[in-house]
Amino acid sequence: MNIEENTLSLLEDLPKTVQLVAVSKTKSNDEIMQAYKSGQRVFGENKIQEMTAKYESLPKDIQWHMIGHVQTNKVKYMAPYVELIHGVDTLKLLKEVNKQAFKNERIINCLLQLHIAEESTKFGMSKKECIDAVGVAKTLENIKIKGLMGMATFTEDTSQISKEFQSLKGLYDELAAENQDFNTLSMGMSGDYQIAIENGSNMIRVGSKIFGARNY
Ligand SMILES: *Cc1c(COP(=O)(O)O)cnc(C)c1O
């Protein structure tokens, strides 16, 4: 496994319009630094404690994205530095991010997570909840909603994955037409990022294809 080479060859293959979030959850500082050597500066984590420890010990030009489910009571730990929160899935969470961003004199960028998969286990808002949240967000001064995020069903059926990504892109286009801040559609992981890009993704979250399999 050569992490630096994996990152470089992935970056080479991506259209210039697509930003790569290197998903480094469970991976060591050493492994992250190998990807860093390729020029990669955007990393994604799904646990706030783990992300904060890495933020504190790694170079400060790394941008940290929270891609996992966020518990409201932990927002305060990442509020000083987090670059983008992908998985905002309740109004309560959105308001807490706004409050903590205010305390830190920051504006924190967020994506709303739309539920697109068939599995009931995946988090996310309904279409209507997303539209409502974008409305509420206009009254919150310390957050910016930059777009949407979603996870497709884990299946071999590529036409189903494609259909789910299309529904996310559809809502994204609808909202982007009326919201100047919208510029980010986060969809696609190691197994489905090509399908995501075909369907309009401009931010992919890739872990195992760069760092190898995780042990859980
Ligand atoms: C772990 C994770 C990824 C990356 O998954 P890979 O299959 O390893 O690329 C992407 N998005 C989210 C939300 C994740 O939790």
Image (tube, rainbow, N blue to C red):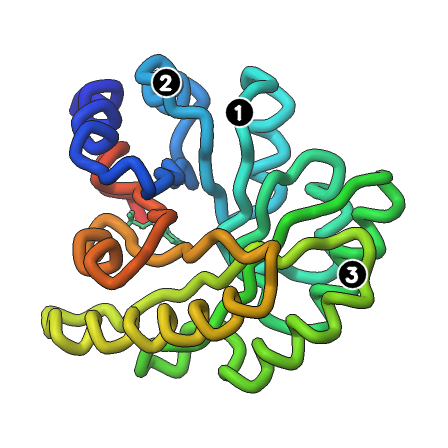
Q: Earlier in the sequence, mark 1 or mark 2?
A: 2
**Residue hosting label 1:** 62
- Which mark is in front, 3 or 2? 2
| Residue at screen point 51% across, 83% down | 126
In space, the residues marked 3 and 2 are separated at their CA atoms by 33 Å
* 108 lies above or below 171: above
Amino acid bearing label 1: Ile
Q: Nearer the viewer, residue 151 or 194?
A: 194
Amino acid bearing label 2: Gly
Q: Is mark 1 within 8 Å of ligand 1?
A: no
Judged left or right of residue 109, residue 194 is: left
Name the disc covering residue 39, or none.
Answer: 2
Q: Earlier in the sequence, mark 3 or mark 1?
A: 1
Q: Quadrant of residue 82?
A: top right
- Crowd tier of the residue under label 2, counting other residues whose Cα lies within 10 Å: few below 14, some 14–19, many 20 or above: few
> Residue 113, how many percent across, how many down?
50, 67
**Residue hosting label 3:** 96
- Crowd tier of the residue under label 1, counting other residues whose Cα lies within 10 Å: few below 14, some 14–19, many 20 or above: some
| Residue at screen point 75% across, 36% down | 80
* 41 lies above or below 198: above
Q: Is mark 3 within 8 Å of ligand 1?
A: no
Name the disc covering residue 91, or none.
Answer: none
Amino acid bearing label 3: Glu
* 45 lies above or below 141: above
Q: Earlier in the sequence, mark 3 or mark 2?
A: 2
Quadrant of image for the N terminus: top left
